[in-house]
């Protein structure tokens, strides 16, 4: 884990400070007994016995000129014994007179988490709140004074130049991350979102921060639904990212399963999920203009498109609405209650006639039945039945307009049947056979002989 790795680096550097410079010419030991006690402390590699001797030193020489050295020894000993309450308080005292003391800064930033209840919903005690306030101020100080804190003359004895150079950006990133974590603990979601986003800008490899940001964003979805796509992006980040400081594979797999469920619930399908993962794998934060359409967005977009289509072609919109109802689970009931024996389109929404492409006629000449395609120009979905035949013959593909009375329908394949009068059909171009007159009409006059 990145947290353990960072703290480990901090403590390793801090521990080197145990080689204390006790030969300051401006200070004096009260007597040889104090000096001997200090030397035994400095040489003792057992933190428990060293702590006992430190207490003896403090008790016997409370006003020692080396009280500051003793305080440093206490800090390191408490750290080695994992007594972080005592170490934290000792660090606070050291920083009062030495605000750039690396060991103390590192203790406060590195181990504030050990002093706060692990349960997310646990109530914070006054001591917890005070500790968080201290850690927040310390983090802000480090960020504002990082060059001073890590100046060359501040490098502890025994720390190499390479270690010191590596510690500076690590500490800066860690201070920023701590601000985000504190805001999470204090349930200040807007601030946590801001600070964790800054954390990822500084260190895109921090997968734990990405996961924390995802949690913060998702927690705001009720009041701010627009945060949900951003949360999904961060979940895609931690599930897909496998570079330095990535989460363990098993954890990424669990998060991937959660992401898939959350994404399909929000979007309505898994469409676009693979692209989201690919983008998040190479970006710790979403690109400008990032958006995922929700099922509500998609429904609204569809409704807007349908509304625009209805305004552009009210006839087709009316037909589609009737067809959609008849094709649904309640199609037969809808037909019986609202369509059967109805004169359609009946001037609904100003539509006087339906329009369709001629698919076939029965019979081919002087037909009494036409099949038309209203919606899909290749598939018949209307049958027109006439009492009297239409004249002549018309090739398929022509456009026919009609109104009539609905007399039957089938759901699969869809077909709506109308009874129509010849006068209610327009667009028919068939003509009677050459030389044939209309029934009851006059015969053609004979040609004159020359």
Image (cartoon, rainbow, N blue to C red):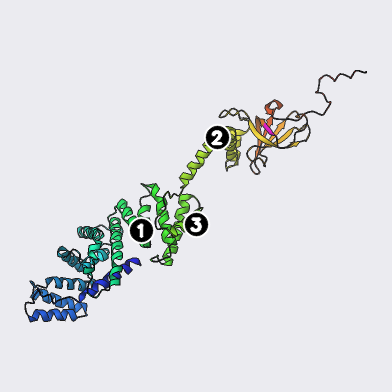
The magenta region covers 396-400
**What is the crowding at mark 1: few (fewer than 14 residues within 10 Å), some, or many (at least 20)?**
many
Name the chief secondary structure element in magenta: loop
Indicate which disc residue 274 carries. 3
Q: Secondary structure at mark 1?
A: helix
Q: Which residue is more in the foreground, 169 or 82?
A: 169
Q: Position of residue 362 (x, y in %)?
A: 76, 36
Please state if 358 lies on the left or on the right of 54 as rendered: right
Indicate which disc residue 200 carries. 1
Structural distance between the alpha carbons of marks 1 and 3: 22 Å
Marks 3 and 1: in contact by CB < 8 Å? no
Q: Position of residue 113 (x, y in %)?
A: 27, 63
Dot placed on the residue nearer the N-terminal end, 2 or 3: 3
Which numbered mark, 2 or 3, is in the foreground of this view?
3
Q: Secondary structure at mark 3?
A: helix
Indicate which disc residue 310 carries. 2
Give the residue displayed 37% in from the left and 48% down from the top.
222
Q: Position of residue 21 (x, y in %)?
A: 16, 75
Which numbered mark, 1 or 2, is in the foreground of this view?
1
């Amino acid at each position: 884990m990145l947290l353990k790795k960072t703290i480990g680096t901090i403590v390793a550097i801090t521990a080197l400070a145990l080689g204390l410079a006790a030969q300051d010419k401006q200070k004096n030991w009260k007597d040889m007994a104090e000096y001997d006690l200090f030397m035994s402390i400095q040489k003792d590699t057992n933190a428990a016995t060293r702590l006992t001797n430190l207490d003896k030193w403090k008790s016997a020489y409370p006003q020692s000129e080396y009280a500051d050295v003793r305080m440093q020894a206490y800090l390191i000993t408490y750290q080695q014994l994992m007594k972080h309450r005592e170490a934290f308080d000792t660090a606070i005292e050291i920083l009062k007179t030495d605000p750039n003391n690396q060991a103390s800064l590192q203790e406060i930033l590195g181990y504030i988490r050990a002093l706060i209840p692990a349960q997310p919903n646990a109530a914070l005690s006054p001591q917890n709140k005070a500790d968080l306030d201290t850690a927040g101020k310390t983090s802000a100080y480090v960020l504002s004074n990082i060059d001073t804190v890590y100046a060359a003359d501040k490098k502890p004895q025994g720390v190499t130049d390479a270690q010191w150079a590596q510690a500076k950006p690590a500490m800066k990133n860690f201070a920023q991350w701590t601000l985000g974590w504190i805001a999470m603990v204090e349930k200040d979601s807007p601030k946590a979102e801001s600070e964790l986003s800054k954390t990822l800008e500084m260190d895109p490899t921090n997968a734990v921060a990405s996961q924390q940001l995802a949690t913060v964003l998702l927690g705001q979805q009720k009041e701010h639904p627009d945060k949900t796509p951003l949360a999904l992006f961060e979940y895609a980040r931690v599930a897909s990212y496998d570079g330095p400081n990535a989460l363990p594979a098993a954890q990424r797999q669990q998060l991937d399963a959660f992401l898939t469920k959350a994404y399909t619930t929000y979007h309505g399908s898994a469409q676009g999920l693979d692209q989201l993962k690919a983008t998040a794998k190479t970006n710790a934060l979403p690109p400008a203009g990032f958006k995922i359409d929700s099922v509500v967005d998609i429904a609204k977009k569809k409704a807007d498109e349908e509304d625009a289509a209805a305004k552009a072609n009210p006839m087709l919109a009316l037909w589609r609405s009737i067809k959609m109802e008849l094709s649904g689970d309640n199609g037969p009931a809808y037909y019986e209650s609202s369509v059967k024996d109805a004169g359609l389109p009946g001037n609904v929404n100003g539509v006087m006639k339906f329009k369709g492409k001629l698919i076939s006629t029965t019979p081919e000449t002087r037909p009494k039945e036409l099949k038309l395609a209203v919606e899909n120009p290749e598939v018949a979905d209307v049958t027109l039945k006439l009492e009297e035949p239409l004249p002549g013959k018309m090739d398929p593909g022509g456009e026919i307009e009609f109104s009539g009375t609905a007399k039957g329908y089938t759901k699969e394949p869809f077909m709506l049947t109308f009874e129509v009068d010849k006068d209610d059909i327009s667009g028919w171009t068939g003509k009677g056979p050459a030389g044939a007159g209309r029934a009851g009409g006059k015969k053609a006059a004979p040609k004159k002989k020359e």
